[in-house]
Image: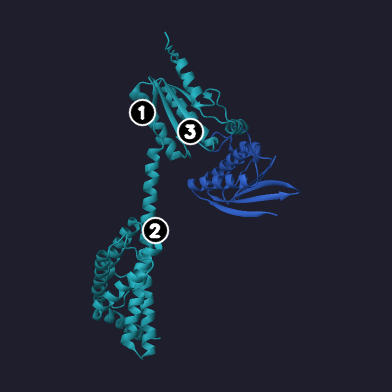
Chain colours: A cyan, B blue
Amino acid sequence: MSTGFRQTDERSLSDILIRHETEIASAWISEQASLISHRPDLLTETELRQQSRALLSEITSAARMDPSLNLANSAWKATRDLLSEISRSRALAGFSPAETASFVFSLRGALMDRLQTVYEEDARSLAAAMRSCSTFVDQLGLVTTSTVLKTREELIKKQQEEMLELSTPVVRLFDGVLCLPLIGTLDSARTQVVMESLLQKIVETGSTIAIIDITGVPTVDTLVAQHLLKTVSAARLMGAECIVSGIRPQIAQTIVHLGVELHNVATKATLADALALAMQKRGLTIQRVNKQA
Amino acid sequence: MTKADTLPIHTEEDIVRVRQMTRSLAQQSGLNLVDQTKIVTAASELARNTLVYGGGGHVILERLQDAGRAGLRLTFEDQGPGIADIELALRDGYTSGKGLGLGLSGAKRLSNEFHIDSRVGEGTTVSIIKWKS
């Protein structure tokens, strides 16, 4: 197949797009409404019409500038941007990736019906136009899919960052006694946040005792141990004493086998034990009030 | 009969995934809570070594059934710089990096069987087994 021949074919698809924009648009909209991925709960009929018409109008104006229908060309920037924006808003609205992708893939059906009407008996030209149509819709599909993926990645990253802040609250248990309940994986980034917020809080509250509770930490390996030891040393430099609590039996045995030395650190099995020790160190006792007296 | 899974180790998140997979396989193999914790901790140490010192690699996780014994074998492989002196690397407190120097020796103590094979310039393979007690 010569290049000239190919170009003619593609030009025909772009011509059809431009000449039959209105018909294609209504065929596409009814095609979408009939799909199982049609979600009137997430997107109203009016919005669907607006989005489809807007995208198709961008496509036809780009097709006028670039009849080869190559989405990588600069003529298609506005189309790519609009499609990305629509895909992004759908992903955020709660459409599944498949539902979002079927938005552009349903254009294929509408286009192919139109090609069939235009070419009728000319099987050879029809086949060539179908091929261009397929390639074109695939390119649109790729834009949609990569946008959906990017949106998800952004969402995951945002959630990770939120979790980083959420999971490191420093709470005041008593006058001069702070508690840092650790939950989940202690990687380097999180430990940094944890350490800083603890040290900051020690300054703010003038506390002398900080309890680090690791009940919610599933694995204590040498890196976690090292982070704990560093936090304890830093707190000590600021005049606060640390108690590590929540050391479960299996964690205790594992720490021993690892060979990690924690003998400069006060440790307790439970948070309750640690609080009792903290009270004792502060010279405080808890007394039951005798109601009869 | 063995069933093997392979996980890549190229980021910190991969280490978390290795720990989770190890924990779930250890539970399926019927290891008790202490042994589960030990093998998960050993896996964490070795996965971090693979990432930090080996420049990344992968781990093969296999559930073992051997003469009525159930167990779990983890094989960590990397194509990193290798370890010149394995005896030194296994010494408590020795580290070529910034760690506590207890990871490799600790992993050895935490498992029932431990094999290390390393060639300078070619890479390192560390294999551990934890049997159901």
Q: Residue furthest top?
A: A293
Q: Nearer the viewer, residue A90 or B104?
A: A90
Q: Are marks 1 and 2 in contact (CB under 8 Å)?
A: no
Q: The residue under label 1 is which amino acid type? A: Gln
Q: The residue under label 3 is which amino acid type? A: His
Residue A289 percent across, percent down from the top left: 42, 13
* Residue in view at x 32 percent, y 70 percent: A33
The chain ID associated with circle 3 is A
The residue at which mark 3 appears reads as A227
Q: Is residue A195 at all visible to an observer of this figure? A: yes
Mark 1 or 2, closer to the camera? 2
Distance between the alpha carbons at the discs numbered 1 and 3: 17 Å
The numbered mark, 1 or 3, whose residue comes first in the sequence reads: 1
The residue at which mark 1 appears reads as A200
Q: Are marks 3 and 2 in contact (CB under 8 Å)?
A: no
* Residue in view at x 37 percent, y 57 percent: A150
The residue at which mark 2 appears reads as A149
Same subunit: marks 3 and 2: yes
Q: Is residue B124 above or below residue A273?
A: below
The chain ID associated with circle 1 is A
The numbered mark, 3 or 2, whose residue comes first in the sequence reads: 2
Distance between the alpha carbons at the discs numbered 1 and 2: 38 Å
Q: Quadrant of residue A256?
A: top right
Q: Nearer the viewer, residue A105 or A76?
A: A105
Q: Nearer the viewer, residue A79 or A283?
A: A283
